[in-house]
């Protein structure tokens, strides 16, 4: 007899656990990640299969004298309990996730003390899952409307070899010494396949994106897929254009400003293996990528990678767990790495840091003057600007040039 562990799609903390149901013998299409219809109390509910188990119970109560008495009592108690289990009523969908996805759900729920049902929906397509709603005195199942897939014409997914050939043709220029070292580090992490992390600490203009692009090409050559996270949706179009220029139509885009239908089309294309590179914001981390080989988080220090509503996960930490689980490589890029990442590079042998202190075009970085405002105040200055800044502003205006002032606070500043 088969049983399944099911997480109910009911948003209440009192039901935040998995429940066991019996699988009817004729139900052959059930799998981990499927949405199923079950009976819960006096109502029906949608749930998601987290685990399938084979149970061998002796329902006749026969005694095996070679078995210890305590074990016999436990076995017969389990058999009695199993006879009271309710059956799964129907399978409502193909799998949304696999065993690795189920483990990811458990990890996020445990680490961030989040409801299991909320964690499940991180891995399901937005607006494309079945629901049970109460109408009058009864509960009715509502399946998502079938979406007509857009005519793809003569589109056929490119093989990894074709993608690699195209990418290499566009890599006609040589990397700088710093870029070459960074790419070599990432390549080693990909080759070892043990969940290592490469932190690229590179100044603005040092060429981190080119390292990302070549790392993705190396990942695709292994037959694996890649996820690329950017901190803001506004950055997605310009980032996507660079990646599409290198990898063509194998690039999928995922972010919250897309309609539910558009996001589902991209999600399904990734699940079917038509798209091998995903570029998007935080939620793109949970695309159903088969054979995940590389995760890239650009501007890893940004606070937008922290989810502010339940489940309150941090994309960087979840990505590190996923990389270790899948044997993938995680690449973090930033001109100002987070304190957490710098600390992990010193404490964890699987985390590596490499610096890119120079720009890829060879131009020098601008000079930086740090002004001590306490000294300005002691010399009698009461202005919010230092004398040096004031003089520099007048020089810029007199020369007909522009000046940009960046404030570190908005809403709480004194001026």
Image: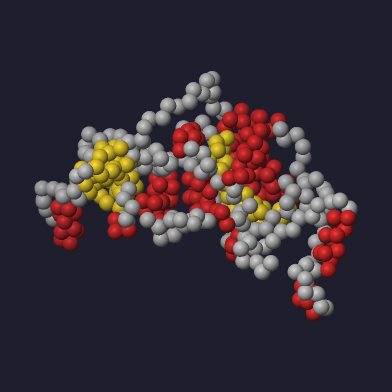
Residue at x 15%, y 48% (from the top left corner): 83
Q: Where on the picture, by quarter, is residue 389? A: bottom right
Residue 203 x/y as whole percent: 73, 54
Q: Nearer the viewer, residue 169 or 305?
A: 305
Using the image, determine if residue 340 lies above or below residue 297: below
Q: In which quarter of the image is residue 109?
A: bottom left
Whether residue 192 is visible, yes or no, is no
Q: What colouring style does the render use?
A: secondary structure
Percent across and percent down for residue 237 are: 62, 39
Pick the front one: 358 or 148 = 148
Taking the spot 84% from the left edge, 51% from the top edge, the residue there is: 401
Q: Which of 406 and 183 is in front in this view?
A: 406
Q: Where is residue 292 in the image (x, y as percent from the top left)?
A: 52, 42
**Residue in the image at 71% along x and 53% along y:** 202
Residue sitting farthest toward the bottom = 378
- Say which residue appears at 37% left-offset and 56% top-offset: 115
Q: Where is residue 243 in the image (x, y as percent from the top left)?
A: 64, 37
Q: Is residue 244 visible?
A: yes
Whether residue 153 sits left or right of residue 140 in the image: it is: right
Q: Which quarter of the image is occupied by the N terminus? A: top left
In this picture, residue 194 sits left or right of residue 69: right
For the image shown, how many numbered marks are present on the structure? Answer: 0
| Residue furthest top in the image | 154
Q: Quadrant of the C terminus?
A: bottom right
């Amino acid at each position: 007899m088969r049983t399944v562990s099911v997480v109910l799609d009911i948003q209440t903390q009192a039901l935040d656990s998995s429940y066991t149901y019996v699988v009817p013998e004729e139900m052959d299409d059930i799998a981990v990640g499927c949405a199923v219809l079950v009976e819960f109390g006096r109502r029906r509910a949608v749930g998601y299969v987290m685990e399938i188990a084979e149970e061998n119970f002796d329902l006749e109560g026969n005694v095996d004298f070679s078995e210890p008495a305590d074990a016999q009592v436990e076995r017969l108690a389990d058999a009695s309990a199993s006879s009271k289990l309710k059956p799964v009523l129907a399978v409502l969908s193909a799998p949304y996730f696999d065993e690795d996805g189920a483990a990811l759900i458990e990890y996020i729920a445990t680490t961030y003390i989040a409801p299991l049902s909320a964690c499940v929906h991180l891995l399901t397509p937005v607006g494309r899952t079945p629901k049970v709603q109460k109408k009058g005195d009864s509960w009715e199942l509502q399946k998502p409307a079938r979406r007509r897939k857009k005519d793809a014409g003569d589109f056929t997914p490119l093989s990894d070899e074709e993608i690699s050939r195209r990418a290499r043709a566009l890599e006609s220029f040589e990397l700088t010494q710093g870029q070459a070292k960074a790419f070599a580090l990432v390549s080693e992490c990909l080759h070892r396949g043990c969940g290592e992390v490469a932190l690229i600490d590179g100044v603005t203009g040092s060429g981190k994106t080119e390292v990302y692009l070549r790392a993705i090409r190396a990942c695709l050559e292994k037959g694996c897929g890649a996820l690329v996270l950017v901190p803001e949706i506004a950055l997605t179009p310009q980032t996507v254009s660079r990646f599409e220029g290198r990898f063509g139509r194998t690039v999928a885009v995922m972010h919250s400003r897309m309609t539910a239908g558009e996001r589902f089309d991209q999600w399904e294309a990734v699940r079917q293996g038509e798209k091998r590179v995903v570029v998007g914001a935080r939620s793109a981390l949970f695309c159903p990528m088969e054979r995940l080989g590389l995760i890239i988080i650009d501007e890893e220090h940004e606070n937008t990678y922290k989810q502010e509503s339940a489940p309150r996960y941090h994309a960087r930490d979840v990505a590190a767990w996923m990389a270790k689980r899948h044997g993938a490589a995680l690449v973090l890029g930033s001109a100002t790495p987070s304190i957490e990442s710098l600390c992990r590079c010193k404490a964890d042998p699987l985390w590596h840091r490499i610096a890119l202190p120079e720009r890829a075009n060879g131009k020098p970085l601008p000079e930086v003057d740090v002004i001590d405002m306490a000294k300005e105040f002691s010399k009698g200055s009461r202005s919010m600007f230092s004398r040096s800044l004031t003089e520099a502003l007048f020089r810029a205006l007199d020369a007909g040039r522009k000046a940009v002032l960046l404030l570190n606070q908005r809403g709480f500043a004194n001026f």
